Image (spheres, grey):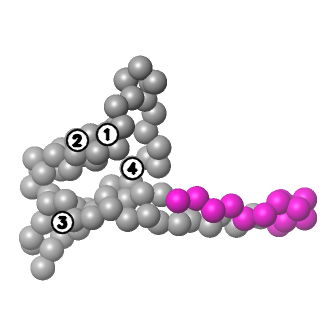
Amino acid sequence: MYEYKMVQVPPNIEVKASKHRGNEAAVYLESIANQYAEQGWEFYRVDTVGVAVQVGCFDALAGKKATNSAYYVITFRKPR
């Protein structure tokens, strides 16, 4: 049996052009994984979760439509 922890991460990582090396996502995820590993959590996986935001009554009358966003979640686990 495992206990799980989910950590939402930003969909985009901003870097200055002069510092761009092409491995920013890997470095970022590695730093998060190491941070949680120090607390006893084992990296398990990364998932994309889609969220649809429905419009309210007044926005629907104004012609606005639902919007979709993708969020990224890192899952960590450790034995109970």
Q: Tell which circle, 3 or 1, labels the residue nearer the N-terminal end.
A: 1
Residue position for label 3 = 77
- Decide which of tag 1 and tag 2 comes sooner along the chain: 1
Distance between the alpha carbons at the discs numbered 1 and 2: 12 Å
Q: Is residue 21 above or below residue 79?
A: above
- 79 relative to 30, above or below: below
- Is disc 1 placed on a helix, strand or loop? loop
For the question of whether residue 13 can be seen, the reply is yes
- Secondary structure at badge 3 equals strand
Mark 4 or 1: the one toward you:
1
Residue pointed to by mark 1: 23
Q: Which comes before the other along the chain, label 2 or label 4?
A: 4
Which quadrant holds the N terminus? bottom left
Query: Quick one: quadrant of the C terminus?
Result: bottom left
Give the number of the mark in front: 2 or 3.
Answer: 2
Query: Which is more foreground, mark 1 or mark 2?
Result: 1
- Marks 2,4: beta carbons within 8 A: no
Name the residue beneath numbered marker 4. 9
Measuring from the top left, give residue 50's x and y in whole percent: 53, 66
How far apart marks 3 and 4 lie (CA) works out to 17 Å
Which amino acid type is marked by label 2? Ser
Which residue does the numbered mark 2 point to in the structure image?
A: 31
Seen from this angle, which residue lies furthest front?
A: 22
> Which amino acid, mark 3?
Arg
Q: Residue at x 34, y 31 (%)?
A: 21
Q: Amino acid at mark 1?
A: Asn
